[in-house]
Amino acid sequence: MKKQLMLLGALLGGTLISQAGVKVAVAPELGLDSLRVQGVLFSELLTATRQNPPKVSQSIYEIADGRSEFALPLSEAANYQILLNNQNGVDFYATPGDNLEIELRGDGSYNITGTRLMEDLNEFRGLLAPIDASYEALMASGKADRESVMALAAQYENVAKDFYASHKDSPAAAYALLEVEGEDFLNLVPTMSEEARKSIFYPMVEQKEKGVRAQLEKEKMRNELSSGNVEAPDFKLPDLEGKMVSISDFRGKWIVLDFWGAWCKWCIKGFPALKEAYEKYKGELEVIGIDNRDTPEEWKAAVARFKLPWINLYNAGNDESGILAAYLVEGFPTKAIINPEGKVVDITVGEDPEFFVRLASLMGK
């Protein structure tokens, strides 16, 4: 449930530059004699990639008589985290010159005061806490399904919208807006107050705005491609024997293109249901598995290991060109349904049981 800000624990160090800083009161029940503090510059968060992650540093501060004090170590706005154990931490956000007071309570909860941003974020996080707890309980139950997860996500987003509406003059409004998605997010961005636009989170809002616009454009293109009016993009890819295979070879049959990879656990989870459909509609339906991002050896080994009975092809291309671009593949698995006339009638991203309901309906079953 937590978005990109909560996922980033990688951190960049620096030199102590300010007399302003952080005072921490530590409950004795926590059993701590020191604090591990990490932080990452917002400027690095904006440019971070898997290939170029933020630089990491960590500082340790002594606790004396239940208290610890330290100056903010970074020279720009930053995301900091006090690491309490391997599972939990206290996130806070600060700019040089800020003075914060943090209370670490014996039950693991905490309170942060000193800036409008952090005080309002305390309120926002408190509103989200019950939903986070419900999500964790759902995942632990082993009964999580798409519908229940999406219902919680909708609750999360509604809380963010309400908080944004009631805190428009707060720098935390920009943080809350990052929890809103799609058209709703784009509609709210122009309503941001001047104070919210001064927030350290505003550059992230700008970055997200570009990404959401691009994503919605791709969704529009995907809807057009799968409208039933567009000829399925043709291709030629090698099968297990090295023979070049084209989609046009199967005109007159229903076709499912399954874009997958041996590294993709959700792709593998979907194989049993796909095998069932393949057997059920044999003679009318052809399944063409298209492996991506594996070596030829990994691909062939996976086909054998999972006993994939359909036509198996290997794509050595990349995401920016070739078949992945033609079918607007952004995630794996992606499945495309092509009718006997050679038109694309459905594209499904991710492992979704409803895909097979749509397949049966399209085939008139």
Image (spheres, rainbow, N blue to C red):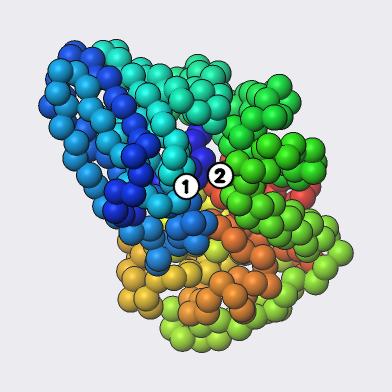
Q: Secondary structure at mark 2?
A: loop
In percent of width and height, residue 190 lies at 79, 43
Q: Is residue 333 above or below residue 242?
A: above
Q: CA distance from mark 2 to mark 1?
A: 7 Å
Q: Residue at x 21, y 33 (%)?
A: 35
- Which residue bears the numbered disc 2? 200
Closer to the N terminus: mark 2 or mark 1?
Answer: 1
Please state if 245 lies on the left or on the right of 99 as rendered.
right
Relative to 225, is 323 above or below? below
Residue 162's mark?
none
Residue 178 seen in the figure: no
Q: Is residue 306 left or right of residue 163?
A: left
User: Would you identify the image quadrant in which residue 224 lies?
Assistant: bottom right
* Residue type highlighted by circle 1: Ala
Q: Which residue is mark 1?
A: 77
Three-letter code, disc 2 = Ile
> Would you say 205 lies left or right of 340 here?
left
Residue 25 shows up from this direction: yes
